[in-house]
Image: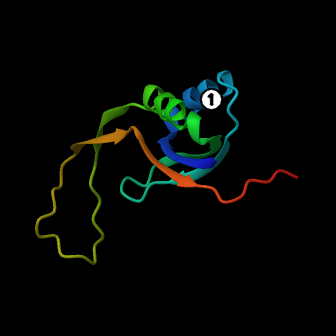
Amino acid sequence: MKKLVIAVVQDKDSSRLSDALVKQNLRATKLASTGSFLKSGNTTFMIGVEEDRVDSVLKLIQDNCRSRKQIMSPITSMGTNAEGYVPYPVEVEVGGATVFVLPVDQFLQF
């Protein structure tokens, strides 16, 4: 049975993951995407694999997509209530990967 692994990774990890997938002879489709929280660039990988290869794909993703700390300057719009607004940069954790594994009913290539 085929599975679809969808991995949303930070752009900084995209090339490293792409190279690792190629080395393992795994095909992937890359889509440019944007995160909603930090509004920064991401890459979404769609990887179709046999069920018995899912764990090795997940390991590749885990090994090549690391979380890291980043300083973020919060932005508030002038129209919102500024109560509770923190006007100084804060450290947030970014990166890593968000991964979904879905069953595939049918897989075709034309």
Q: Position of residue 66 (x, y in %)?
A: 39, 31
Q: Please tell me in which quadrant of the rendered image residue 15 appears.
A: top right
67 or 1, nearer to the observer: 1
**Is 51 left, or right, of 68 in this rendering?**
right
For the point 79% across and 54% down, which residue is it?
108
| Total number of numbered discs in the rendering | 1
Viewer-nearest residue: 76 or 95: 95
| Left or right: 64 in relation to 96 | right
Dot 1 amino acid type:
Leu
Location of mark 1 (residue): 21
Above-or-below relation of 64 to 93: above
How crowded is the residue under tag 1: few (<14 C-alpha within 10 Å), some, or many (20+)? some
Q: Find the residue positioned furthest to the right.
A: 110
As drawn, which residue projects farthest toward the left?
84
Farthest top residue in view: 23
Residue depicted at x 62% and y 29%: 21
Which residue occupies the foreground of this view, 31 or 60? 60
Q: Quadrant of residue 94?
A: top left
The x and y percentages for residue 51 are: 58, 41
Q: Position of residue 27 (x, y in %)?
A: 70, 37
Quadrant hosting residue 43? top right
Residue 5, percent from left and from top:
56, 46
Helix, strand or loop under label 1? helix
Question: What's the residue at 65%, 24% (across, down)?
Answer: 24
* Residue 100 vertical placement versus 81 (above, below): above
Looking at the image, what colour scheme do you see? rainbow
